[in-house]
Image (cartoon, helix red, strand yellow):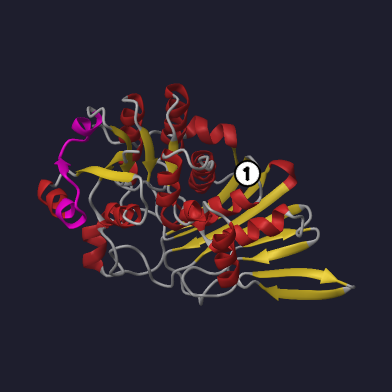
Amino acid sequence: MSAIRIAIIGAGQIGKHHLTQYQQVSGIEVAAICDIRGDEAARVAAQFGVPDTYTDFREVLKRDDIVAVDVCLHNNFHAPVTIEALKAGKHVYCEKPMAGSYRDAHAMLEVAKETGRMLHIQLGTLFTVETRAAKTLIDEGKLGKLYHARSTGYRRRGRPYVDGYGTPSFTRKADASGGALYDMGVYHISQLLYLMGMPAPLRVSGETYQEMAMLENRREISQFDVEELGVGFVKLAGGITLDIIEAWSVHMDAFEGSSLMGSEGGIRLPRMKNGHALTYHFTCSDMDMDATIDLHSAHNRYHLLNDWAWAYDSPEKHWAAVLQDLVPLMPTAKLALDTMLISEGIYQSSKLGREMTADEILELSVSSAVKL
């Protein structure tokens, strides 16, 4: 069978990462790269062996041989490019967060339904070995009835650009719409929603902060107007609750990893990028037990016993397998949409000083999509 052709829209850091993932699977050909910086598109195309380059994404959408596009742009470009691509008959894989506002994300999913095209959102934490292990324990009833979860994300001083990493686009509402919650929180919140069985968010309250000092020249250049710390509390369907703390920058040592609590047991997820274990906490013979999961062995065994295990190793590999009709698409778009509702609910609650209902969040949400 001939390879399925896809195109990358956006040749920046994220686009390059996606390209490295596609190189690890068969059956997919990246046929084109599009970036408004023609020279960078040409350089990346040469590096990865991609035959065609464009500076206008609409020219890519005209190609009948390209089945799907991969949108690797700043947040406020996600909705307009994705919607045009869906209407042009392309399946779309889009970077996180789903969009710059809940209203835009909602529109993206509605257009996907209307056009019958697939929409996949980059939620990398769904494809980690710890998520798979935690889901197995939950599905086998080891936690009993889930009733509370805690979403945590931590950097000591890791604000994009002002603390040395990334570009100013991460710190401006005009490009990104949000800060720590949209950049990092999306991973942790969506991971917990997935593990809890995707209960619907009903009510959201929270607060956002930008309090810590930064170098004045970096503040001026970055035009930093998003949050460095976001906290929230969410009431979910089924009587489940979720509390959230997400820090780009905070005067505190490392937070504990995210956690889930159930009637029969609890799980502590590893903290980001520090190698800490997944732990399982339960009672046996009237004694309290704390178990450490051997994730390395779990990963190896899963791959030895499952032919399509590779299709769940990363969002890009999953998308490649889905496009080849090897596995069904995980509900990443719905998870990303509910995560957007929670994040924007925290922003609205912080602004208005009260708890927000899900209906109010959509009603008050304003499109931040860039006019193309």
Please name whichever residue, 143 or 215, is drawn nearer the observer in this view of the structure: 143
Q: In x, y percent, where is residue 163? A: 31, 69
Callout 1 amino acid: Met
Where 165 sits versus 331, above or below? below
Q: In x, y percent, where is residue 257? A: 58, 68
Quadrant location of the C terminus in the rendered image: top left
Asked if residue 211 lies in the magenta stretch, the reply is no
Quadrant location of the N terminus in the rendered image: top left
Q: Is residue 302 left or right of residue 321?
A: right
Please name whichever residue, 346 or 191, is drawn nearer the observer in this view of the structure: 191
Q: In x, y percent, where is residue 22? A: 34, 52
Residue occupied by mark 1: 198
Task: Say what secondary structure mark 1 lies in.
Answer: loop
Q: Is residue 270 left or right of residue 83?
A: right
Residue 331 shows in this picture: yes
Q: Residue at x 50, y 47 (%)?
A: 343
Q: Is residue 216 left or right of residue 361?
A: left
Q: Residue at x 59, y 36 (%)?
A: 358
Q: How many marks?
A: 1
Where does the magenta region start and end? Answer: 44-61
Q: Quadrant of residue 152?
A: bottom right
Q: How many neighbours does mark 1 have within 10 angstroms: few (below 14), some (14-19), or many (20 or more)? A: some
Residue furthest to the top: 114
Q: In x, y percent, where is residue 32? A: 21, 42
Residue 174 shows in this picture: no
